[in-house]
Structure formats: C-alpha cells, structure tokens
Image (tube, rainbow, N blue to C red):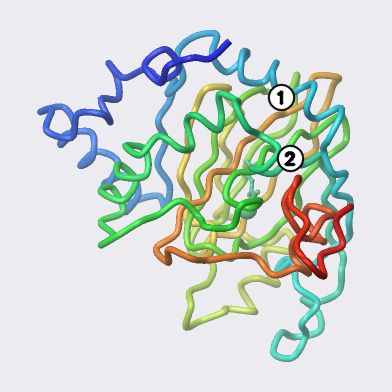
Amino acid sequence: MTFKIEDILDLEAYPLDQPDHLFSDELVSEKQRNWQAEGAFLLSAFLRPGMADRAAEELTGLMNADAFRHDERHNIYFSDDSREIPSALTSNQLRTSNWTLTCDQLGGTIIRTIYEWPPLCEFIRRVLALPSLHRMADPMACLNVMSYGDGDCLDWHFDRAEFAVTLLLQAPESGGQFEYRRALRTRDNPNYDGVQMLLKGKDRNIRTIEPTAGNLSVFAGYGSAHRVSPIVGSRPRMMAVLSFMEEPDFQYGPEDRMRFYGRSSPQGSNPEGAGTP
Ligand SMILES: O=C(O)CCC(=O)C(=O)O
Ligand SMILES: [Fe+2]
C-alpha cells in the first residue's frame, strides 16, 4: 500500500508544505531558539498515530532479508587515522552493533517517501538558516535505517556531517536512550582533553532523550559527542537517519561504505572495480 505524505505526517501540527502559513514562521522561530539553546530540536509526534508502526512493519522484512550486520570496536572518531589524534583517543575501546539498511534498499517505503519530500529539506534549511541544503548525493548513505536488538548499542562518536536528522520508527521495551554532550569540539578546536574527560565518565553535561516513536530530531552531530545506550528486550529499536548536506555532491568513499554497509556500491548496480556481487 502506498501512502500520501499527508497521510503519513501530521501537517496540521507541522504545516511544512505551507511556508507562508502564519504558524510556519512561529514554528521556525521556536525551533531556532531550541537549536541555539540546546544544539538540537525536536518535532514530537511528527508522524500521524500508527504511521511509525506501519513504517517499522514494512522494514522488518527488509531487515531480516537484506540488512548488514555492523559490529565493531572503534574509537570516538570512527577513524583509524592516528596522525593527529592523541593515542589515548585512537585505541578502539568503544563498541557498536546494529543491523543497517541503506537508501538503495528502501525503494517504495514510507521512510523513503518522507526523506524525498522536498518541504522537509526546505524546513530544516530555514531553521538552521543555511543558504542552501540538499539531500546527500550518496545513493547508499543518504538514508539509513538501523535496527538495534537486545544488547546492541551505538557507542560514543562524533558524526562527519555538521548535523543529523533522525526519526524513531520503533522504541525498544527499555534502554536505547540517546545521550549527547553538546559542543564538545569545533572545526577549529578538537578539545582532546574534554573528549578524554567524557570517555573517562567525568563529564557532567550529558543530556538524555528518551526514545519515542514518531519523533523527528535534528542535532549538531559534528560538534556534539553522542551515543545510544544498550537496548533491553526483544523489540528492536528502529531508527532512520536522514542526511542533508550543504554540498550538493558529497559521497562516501569505498572504505567507509565497506565499513558501515559491507558493500562498496548500491544494490543492483555493478560498476567496474566495485566488489558487490
Ligand atoms: O540512533 C540514534 O539515535 C543516533 C544515530 C547516530 O548517531 C548515527 O547514526 O550517527
Ligand atoms: Fe551519530
């Protein structure tokens, strides 16, 4: 069954399709205040009731058939490049595991319909006051859905992109909270001492967001360290990560694709030199 965007999103509460609506300006200003104060903003109950369940249901079969098992020890930078980083921070002491689907595997799904709806990108651009914003050009990385089962987690890390947009489709029975430490580094100041304090458990400025299905959140993932606590129980935590970039043509390299997705090219394509069957 295909759903129209107005059946999926609560466009009465969030009239993203009507930028001239009086309420739209108010909504943008309110989210801008949250963004400035907290390095994050939230659209709670962005999906209409029942729609997160529908979206999760159609992903469950795909997860079982096609998802990549991402399970690795890593450092907070998800990087093996130790040229500039102090050695205490490059040792792979953190652990992440989940099942991952990429955009090329998500044709015809509710989550892909949401991601490709132009007013969402335009709304985020307005809140963040950016001159331009695009869906990420990478055909795999632009939209990911991660399923975290009992004991799975995503450990402390920084993102490569300036900010991340997430939409929770299914909450676990317990655990799976999103924790973040706002503004721990900038492009000019890596703040290695601060990062070490965080990893030693000595940072008191960590905020926690409880997982609620249907909520969309935007957070400053480059500067804010963040993690997802271990999931408890048999219902997986299912989270979509929607990537928007200021650069129109940003693509992951083959090493990152192998690391996060286990393939170096999209499903169904067979470019020369790529290792995908
Ligand atoms: O699952 C989440 O809440 C955050 C996801 C995340 O940080 C990431 O995929 O980089
Ligand atoms: Fe992240």
Q: Which mark is residue 101?
A: 2
Q: Amino acid at mark 1?
A: Leu
C-alpha distance separating marks 2 and 1: 9 Å
Residue 162 at x, y percent in the picture: 48, 62
Q: Is residue 68 left or right of residue 143?
A: right
**Residue at the image position 46 percent from the left and 38 percent from the top:** 116
The number of numbered badges drawn on the structure is: 2
Query: Considering the numbered disc 2 on the image, is that residue within a helix, a strand or a loop?
Result: strand
Which residue matches tag 1?
Answer: 59
Q: Is residue 101 above or below residue 194?
A: above
Instruction: Describe residue 23's horizontal placement relative to residue 92 as left or right.
Output: left
The answer as to whether callout 2 falls within 8 Å of ligand 1 is no
User: Which is nearer the eye, 235 or 183?
Assistant: 235
Which circle's residue, 2 or 1, is located before the other in the chain?
Answer: 1
Q: Are discs 2 and 1 less than 8 Å apart at CB?
A: yes
For label 1, count other residues whose C-alpha is less than 10 Å away and answer few (under 14), some (14-19) or many (20+). Answer: many
Q: Helix, strand, or loop for circle 1?
A: helix
Q: Residue at x 61, y 52 (%)?
A: 139
Residue 123 position in % (x across, y down): 30, 41
Q: Residue at x 87, y 64 (%)?
A: 93
Seen from the viewer's position, the closer of residues 271 and 210 is 271
Residue 164 located left or right of residue 227: left
For label 2, the crowd category at 10 Å Cα-Cα, with few meaning under 14, some 14 to 19 and many 20 or more, is many
Q: Which three-letter amino acid code belongs to the residue tagged 2?
A: Leu
Quadrant of the rendering where the N terminus is positioned: top right
The quadrant holding residue 13 is top left
